[in-house]
């Protein structure tokens, strides 16, 4: 789709078209292309994120019911399906849902339901012990985020966890990715306080936050290391992922935005 046609779409429409284009050209759902163009780093980050996050969710029972919004190509979907009793996974892109479906089938997971649906229009049944918003809020406009929370939060069990992975503005104001970085990515980066206030309206309390997209030392030294040694180091450095997340200032300079996980809980 060209830019003139794209300009006539609303934010949901632009985001849908963006992810449909990625699904059409990348069987990994944009993993390598969106993470510095380096597939090894992308896979390391993916594994490190899951390792840290599931440690943060250790209190959840294997009998838990999970809602995943923004499932993309299903990388997290299959991990959730392996760990929990039932997973309902949604995405606005039909292409991404098809990739997720193939992943789920290849894993033989019969406890995962997939659907093409925007968060602000989805119809849900029952309650969920965990709601995971996977990098989807910054692809929605303000109204869609608020409407989406009105749809999904009432289905979170008392004491349940809402885990959001999002890219946030660190400059005290909202800005579009294209304004600062160019390209056709329609992401909107909002300050952390904006999300915290939106969640508070629905009785959700922020209890933890941590940065993601770590860059391990062996990747920084990749030009000096043989490929086999680099791969081995990346595998071993997973043990340091928690340290890298807790002390990001040791490994990178802060910028205008940052990729973070936010853990909210519904108290009472």
Image (tube, rainbow, N blue to C red):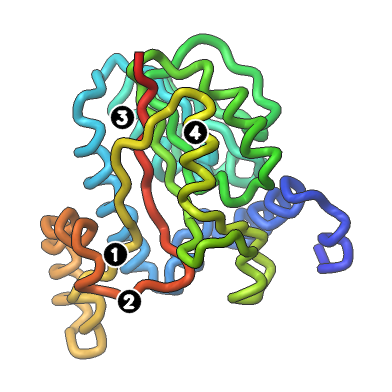
Point out the residue furthest to the top here: 126
State the residue at coordinates (56%, 45%). Answer: 137
User: Given this view, does label 3 or label 4 mark the residue nearer the observer?
Assistant: 4
User: Marks 2 and 3: in contact by CB < 8 Å?
Assistant: no
Which residue is pictured at 25% across the width and 76% down the height?
219
Q: Going from the N terminus, do you reach mark 3 or mark 4 first?
A: 3
| Residue 101 horizontal/vertical position (percent) | 53, 35
Q: In terms of sequence position, does the residue under pointer 2 or pointer 4 come before the other?
A: 4
Whether residue 213 is visible to the viewer of this picture, yes or no, is: yes
Q: CA distance from mark 3 to mark 1?
A: 25 Å
Crowdedness near tag 4: few (<14), some (14–19) or many (≥20) residues, C-alpha within 10 Å: many
Mark earlier in primary sequence (1, 4)? 4
Labels 3 and 1: the sequence-earlier one: 3
Per the rendering, the mark at residue 199 is 4
Task: Give the residue displayed 19% in from the left and 90% down from the top.
Answer: 224
Residue 106 seen by the camera:
no
Circle 2 residue? 253
Nearest to the eye among marks 3 and 2: give it.
Answer: 2
Location of the N terminus (image quadrant)? bottom right
Q: Residues within 10 Å of mark 2 (few under 14, many from 20)?
A: few
Kindly state the secondary structure of the residue where label 4 is placed.
helix
């Amino acid at each position: 789709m060209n830019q003139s046609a794209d300009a006539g779409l609303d934010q949901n429409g632009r985001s849908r078209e963006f992810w449909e284009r990625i699904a059409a050209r990348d069987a990994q759902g944009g993993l390598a292309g969106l993470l510095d163009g380096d597939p090894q780093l992308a896979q390391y980050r993916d594994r490190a994120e899951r390792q840290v996050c599931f440690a943060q969710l250790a209190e959840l029972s294997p009998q838990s019911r999970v809602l995943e919004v923004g499932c993309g190509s299903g990388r997290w979907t299959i991990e959730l399906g392996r760990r929990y009793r039932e997973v309902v996974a949604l995405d606005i892109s039909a292409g991404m849902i098809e990739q997720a479906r193939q992943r789920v089938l290849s894993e033989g997971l019969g406890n995962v339901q997939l659907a093409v649906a925007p968060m602000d229009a989805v119809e849900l049944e029952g309650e969920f012990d965990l709601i995971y918003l996977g990098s989807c809020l910054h692809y929605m406009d303000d109204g869609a985020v608020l409407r989406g929370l009105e749809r999904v939060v009432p289905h979170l069990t008392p004491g349940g966890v809402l885990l959001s992975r999002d890219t946030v503005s660190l400059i005290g104001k909202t800005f579009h990715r294209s304004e600062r970085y160019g390209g056709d990515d329609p992401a909107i980066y909002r300050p952390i306080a904006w999300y915290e206030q939106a969640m508070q309206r629905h009785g959700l309390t922020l209890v933890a936050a941590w940065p993601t997209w770590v860059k391990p030392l062996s990747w920084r030294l990749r030009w000096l290391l043989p490929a086999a040694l680099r791969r081995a180091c990346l595998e071993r450095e997973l043990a340091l992922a928690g340290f890298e997340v807790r002390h990001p200032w040791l490994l990178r300079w802060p910028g205008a935005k940052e990729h973070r996980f936010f853990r909210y809980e519904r108290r009472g």
